[in-house]
Amino acid sequence: MDTPVRIGLIGYGFGGRVFHAPLLAAAPEYEFLGVVTTSPERRAQVAQDVSRPAFDSLEDLVRAGAEAVAVSTPAATHIPLVQQALELGLAVVCDKPFALDAASAVPPSNSRRSTAVR
């Protein structure tokens, strides 16, 4: 891979802080742009832990040049966040469970089919 994928992280709870952020910051295949979180405490933690900016919204992350996003938030928030990311044209990696039931997984699947995201 010649050009690293420009990726951001949504969420900075335990999974984001302990697993995703360190991995994304260290992997040469990625240019880790920063973390979407609105928590003032977690925003400060992002700056301290990985020296990356914290973004207020997914749209702000896209404006910073993101091509992909990892979602590491509470399970009940996965579907709306994945849906929004797909609608913004981002490739998405999401923590499990992706959805709390099969029916709620359908809209993001349909969004992926209707966008250029592969």
Image (spheres, helix red, strand yellow):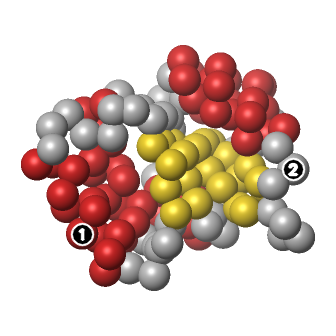
Q: Residue at x 73, y 41 (%)?
A: 24
Q: Residue at x 84, y 38 (%)?
A: 26
Looking at the picture, which amino acid does disc 2 mark? Answer: Pro
Which residue occupies the foreground of this view, 21 or 52?
21
Is 20 placed left or right of 28 in the picture?
left
Q: Measuring from the top left, give residue 118's x and y in whole percent.
A: 49, 72
Looking at the picture, which amino acid does disc 1 mark? Answer: Asn
Is 25 placed left or right of 53 in the picture?
right
Residue under numbered circle 1: 110
- Name above or below for residue 112 compared with residue 54: below
Residue under numbered circle 2: 28
Identify the element where label 1 is drawn. Answer: helix
Q: Tell me if I can see residue 45 in this picture.
A: yes
Rendered-image quadrant of the N terminus? bottom right
Q: Measuring from the top left, give residue 9's x and y in whole percent.
A: 58, 44
Q: Residue at x 27, y 50 (%)?
A: 80
User: Distance from label 2 to label 1 (Cα)?
Assistant: 32 Å
